[in-house]
Image (spheres, rainbow, N blue to C red):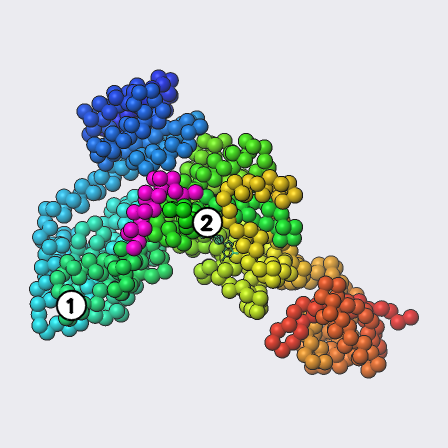
Amino acid sequence: MSEGRDKCVLIIDDSATNRAMLKNILKDEVDVVEAENGEKGLEIIRSQISRIGIVLLDLIMPGISGFDVLTEMKKEHMTDYVPVIMISTANDPGNIEKAFDLGALDFISRPYSERIVRRRVLTTISLFQKQTQLANKIDRQYKADEEQVDKRTGLPYKKNFFNQVDTQLKNPNLGSLYMVAMDIDHFKLFNSYYSWERGDEYIRKIGSILTSATQRHGGVAGYLGGDDFALLCPARIDLVNSLSEQLNRYITENSFEPTFRTNFGVYPIDVAGVHDARQLYDLASIALETIRGDYTRNVTVYDPAMIQKEQDEYKRLLNIRSGIRNGEFTIYIQPKVDMNTGRIFGGEALARWIHDGTVYSPGLFVPVMEKNGLISSLDKLVWDRTARYIKKIIGEGITPLPISVNISKTDIFTMDVPEFFSEIIRAYDIPPALLEAELSESTFMRAPERAADVVQRFHDLGMSVSYDDFGSGYAPLSTIESMDVDMLKIDTTFLHMTPDAPERSRNILEPVLAMAQQIQLPVIIEGVETQGQADFLKRMGCVYAQGFYYHTPMPADRFTRLTSEPENVDASGLTIGIPQAYRVRQILDSNYISDDMVANIFGSTLILNRTGSIVKVGWSLLDHYRDSDLTDLVDPASDVPFSDRVKEEDKERFCSIFDKAIENKDKGAKGTVRFVTKRGDRRIRMRLYYMRSNVSEQIFYSMIDEIDEE
Ligand code: C2E
Ligand code: MG
Ligand code: MG
């Protein structure tokens, strides 16, 4: 670690014991300087700023507090040069938020583990150094030859590029043109995620693709520094799409996370309109902004409405930012219930913004915050509030129920999420099983490896993880199986689950439920709004639900009142719903159970299909008393329908059993019928259950056994 030696750690803490402890943990890796109060600390930072790699700051000190030190550092722009980690004691987690706002990068709470402290401190120092070096490097290069050509990409730099564009635009024979603004999503993270070298290569790759595009199709490409590129090209969207495809291929071939794709904002140049290169680029950038963080699109064309949208979003963002600072964000909790008993077994914490007396839902602020990375500060706040709530409930002697919180996909890229949870669980001293993490389908889809790692680490902490919003996108069923989650949340608002279209919902839900049951995964259905939906879902074997029909999200104290009545709650743990029809089909379908085993469990079983008065065998399985004659009778491949084999006198009775089974879906119907076979009449006792209908036929499940002729 000789490299680390050129920088030292400054510990500002009034307690000599605490300083000694920290010093002891760190002294083998870095030099340590100590200050016993805020004044001394600030003095050292001012005089030796280039030497200090990081400040570990105690929040609570007599005289100048940690907050004062931070405020001062921020005022003098020292936080731009030196990262600060604050140290808080277990009982002041509310302060953590305030410290983040003041520019602290991280926090460690007492009591801390040596390993965590060492890791936090060293990573923060090195990440911070790398970032500053990178910024300097770009700055330097950029200033040195801004007018010229960028060596890495071979493209003209900003001024040079804009001049060339202006010249081209003066050409009176101008065809239709596009101005395209491009950048890489989360490029800063890319560098710390992979390496500068890979980052450089990526930038070079974009340069070479743009160069060959302009050689083939004309136009000008430029490099604007950082991860920003621009292109003036013929107005052909296929051309832009092909650039995007080439770069996507590059991402895939190098196994980079798809999050780091290049985005394209296209401005179609109006021959009669603006002809200033920089303004054209700004307009293209506005289009580009609208797809930042939208992983489903990476090319978009400018639309005048975007300017308004951009301005609105910007205003809202300013409001949100001050809202966070002013404590306008809070959590609501929505109960999760067992549909069979109506009892509550848990809740989900949902962010709410109470601004000017109105309660705003996440739809208004989460997408904007996700786009610009502010979401992580909101999420940390929500997680912290939730942990605090759980602590409070335990303190009041109320049975605590597990509460889940949402993890945004940007969080898992921008911060060490499980580590943060480990800190709050420790700070509030709550059982980890009471705090659950929800990762959404898009996270599992877009960043499967990273998600799997995060899930594993949540499990190591003793927390459970839910797969949120399954069904909202196009995640294949196999993603559920490959992720080691503890609960599946199915998003039914996307299934347009209406009473008049239950068949469609069923077709989508059935395979998912079957798969979940097979891998023993509890399922909760979100968005249950009516009794009809609840009944329908119960019939399909669903047990758990979260929806307005049961409870809407509510302020935390209302949730407390509701769950403090013992008859409203169920703290017995989750079961896996086993739909009756499913149990059968599962076993029939599964390949780990042999036919003989099934026959032993169920006896002889038939699936019968009825169209009008004709009944055919769709599928059959006979127990081991079968003989070839009987096998022939129930053979699905037989040309003679099953109903034609019934003895004439019994035909009417045979029909009536089917009708009764339809009338009585739960209990089914039974009866004895004689069949004509090669070896004479055979008396068969049938038990029949109606399963469902499709377009042309009714489907029944039947258990049969033969009664010996006496
Ligand atoms: P989600 O995690 O799927 O949360 C469930 C959403 O469904 C909540 O919306 C809830 O109010 C809504 N919902 C529940 N029952 C019904 C119903 O019967 N009908 C309908 N139509 N909706 C129902 P909400 O609170 O507006 O949150 C929307 C989304 O915003 C959440 O979806 C989640 O993805 C995100 N979100 C909420 N809080 C946070 C947060 O603290 N951090 C992050 N990153 N995202 C959050
Ligand atoms: Mg959720
Ligand atoms: Mg959900």
Residue at point 14%, 52% (across, down)? 151
Tell me if mark 1 has few (under 14), some (14-19) or many (20+) residues whose alpha carbon lies within 10 angstroms of its own: few
Whether residue 676 is visible: no
The front one of 428 and 637 is 428
Per the image, label 2 sits on a secondary structure element best described as strand
Mark 1 to mark 2: distance in Å?
A: 46 Å
* Residue that mark 2 sits on: 439
Amino acid beneath label 2: Leu
Quarter residue 599 falls in: bottom right
Displayed quadrant of residue 54: top left
Labels 1, 2: front one: 1
The quadrant holding residue 43 is top left
Residue under circle 1?
273
Rendered residue at 25%/40% (across/down): 131
Given residues 336 and 681, the one toward you in this image is 336
- Quarter of the picture holding the C terminus: bottom right
Q: Position of residue 693 (x, y in %)?
A: 64, 72
Identified at 57% across, 41% down, the residue is 561
Q: Which mark is residue 549?
A: none
State the quadrant of the N terminus. top left
Q: Amino acid at mark 1?
A: Gly
Residue 80 in percent (x, y) is at 23, 36
Residue at mark 2: C-beta within 8 A of ligand 2: no
Apparent side of residue 137 relative to residue 707 in the rendered image (left or right): left
Q: Secondary structure of the magenta portion, mostly? A: helix
Give the SS element for disc 1: loop
Query: Is residue 658 inside the magenta stretch?
Result: no
Could you tell me residue 111's position as x and y percent?
A: 43, 26
Image: magenta residue range: 312-330
Q: Is mark 1 within 8 Å of ligand 1?
A: no
